[in-house]
């Protein structure tokens, strides 16, 4: 299996087995045509759109490179540790990059925590099998306009697919588009969480750079509807919820319904620093909180982590699997055996307060 420019057959097989995914056979020639006689004119080649194969998506939660994680960027190929094997198993993997990409700037006023990382963060994500990230969150502009310009420059230079941030509103709400195994994906990122005193300064407008705000629900719905017209699969990545609360807020549920109605096939996100539940809403898949992922200060309940795998056949999510992990020294370490079974059971129980169903 070729995965966004890298090959990881062993890991891919393992992940597919997690979801009991069956291999798809090729189409046989229905006419059973053989080689034409020598006197026959040569057959004219037919052109057709590439076949849409089933694909495996993977999502991780909040990621930064603070504290003890900063030194890991000196060796970006191994910066994310053992969880990279899971990410590389997917055809498309995504995380929430909860940091400004800059070494300059002044910390945003009034914030208790501000995060930043050098451009090598993109190198580390790519090496770990991450194919895209959202920077639409309450740390994406932690170092002001200088940090924003540095982040945008790093995105351009690295060519790392990043959503939810841009030189203006059109760029911030613009989806990242990529074709994976014949499926045209559109990924939109936005944040429903911004500090009150920073909303105006951080929100992208027609004349100013910044972040895509999910508080502007009409703009979000419009973005999804536009993406729907020319895409096979529409994914919306949101920063939303309340810290340490493992049930979704009413505003999350309201927005999820609007986005699904507008054409979103998958809605995922985070912010609470603890995992929330996921499941089906009107036949589409919604996950209310991925929790921390690569996060230096994670401990206690905020160290509960994992990777969400979604198997898609066309627009349908045919299987969902939570692969639990526990963060140690800032890195998510996949759980195995009894510990994995117990944590998966606990995670499934989180669905009870979401209004979502375990099956389509």
Image (tube, grey):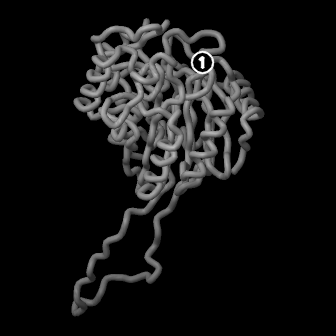
Which percent across, then down, holds residue 230? Answer: 41, 57
Horizontal arrangement in the rendering, residue 38 relative to residue 197 (left or right)? left
Label 1 packing within 10 angstroms: few (<14), some (14-19), many (20+): many
Which percent across, then down, holds residue 204? Answer: 38, 31
Task: Tell which residue pokes out farthest to the bottom in this image.
Answer: 39
User: Which residue is under mark 1?
Assistant: 326
Q: Is residue 27 above or below residue 239?
A: below
Horizontal arrangement in the rendering, residue 194 relative to residue 177 (left or right)? right
Horizontal arrangement in the rendering, residue 68 relative to residue 350 (left or right)? left
Q: Residue at x 47, y 34 (%)?
A: 190
How many marks overall? 1
Q: Residue at x 50, y 41 (%)?
A: 236
Residue closest to the eye, 179 or 176:
176
The answer to whether residue 63 shows anywhere in this view is no
Which percent across, then down, holds residue 61? Answer: 52, 26
Q: Residue at x 33, y 39 (%)?
A: 171
Please identify the quarter of the rendering in which residue 267 is found: top right
Q: Is residue 140 above or below residue 70?
A: below
Q: Is residue 331 above or below residue 288?
A: above
Horizontal arrangement in the rendering, residue 255 relative to residue 353 (left or right)? left
Please identify the quarter of the rendering in which residue 156 is found: top left
Which percent across, then down, holds residue 181? Answer: 41, 53
Q: Is residue 206 above or below residue 28?
A: above
Residue closest to the eye, 352 or 76:
352
Q: Which SS class for mark 1? A: strand
Residue closest to the eye, 7 or 175:
175
Residue closest to the eye, 29 or 218:
218
The answer to whether residue 124 shows anywhere in this view is yes
Please identify the quarter of the rendering in which residue 340 is found: top right
């Amino acid at each position: 299996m070729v995965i966004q420019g890298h090959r990881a057959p062993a890991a891919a097989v393992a992940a597919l087995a997690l979801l009991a995914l069956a291999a798809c056979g090729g189409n046989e020639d229905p006419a059973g045509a053989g080689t034409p006689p020598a006197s026959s004119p040569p057959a004219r080649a037919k052109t057709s759109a590439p076949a849409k194969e089933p694909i495996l998506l993977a999502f991780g939660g909040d990621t930064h490179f603070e504290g003890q994680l900063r030194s890991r960027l000196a060796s970006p190929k191994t910066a994310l540790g053992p969880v990279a094997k899971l990410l590389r198993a997917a055809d498309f993997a995504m995380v929430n990059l909860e940091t400004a990409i800059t070494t300059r700037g002044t910390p945003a006023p009034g914030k208790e925590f501000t995060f930043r990382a050098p451009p090598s963060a993109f190198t580390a994500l790519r090496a770990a099998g991450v194919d895209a990230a959202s920077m639409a969150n309450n740390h994406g502009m932690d170092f002001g306009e200088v940090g924003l310009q540095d982040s945008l420059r790093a995105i351009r230079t690295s060519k790392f697919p990043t959503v939810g941030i841009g030189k203006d509103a059109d760029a911030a709400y613009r989806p990242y588009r990529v074709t994976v195994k014949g499926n045209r994906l559109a990924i939109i990122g936005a944040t429903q969480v911004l500090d009150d005193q920073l909303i105006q300064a951080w929100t992208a407008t027609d004349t100013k750079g910044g972040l895509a705000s999910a508080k502007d629900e009409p703009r979000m719905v419009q973005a999804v509807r536009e993406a729907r017209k020319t895409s096979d699969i529409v994914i919306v990545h949101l920063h939303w919820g309340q810290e340490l609360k493992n049930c979704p807020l009413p505003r999350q549920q309201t927005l999820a319904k609007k986005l699904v109605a507008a054409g979103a096939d998958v809605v995922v996100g985070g912010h609470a620093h603890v995992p929330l539940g996921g499941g089906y809403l009107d036949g589409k898949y919604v996950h209310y909180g991925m929790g921390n992922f690569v996060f230096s200060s994670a401990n206690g309940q905020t160290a509960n982590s994992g990777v969400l795998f979604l198997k898609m056949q066309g627009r349908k999510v045919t299987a969902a699997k939570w692969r639990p992990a526990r963060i140690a020294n800032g890195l998510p370490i996949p759980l195995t055996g009894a510990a994995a079974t117990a944590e998966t059971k606990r995670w499934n129980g989180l669905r009870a307060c979401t209004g979502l169903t375990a099956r389509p």
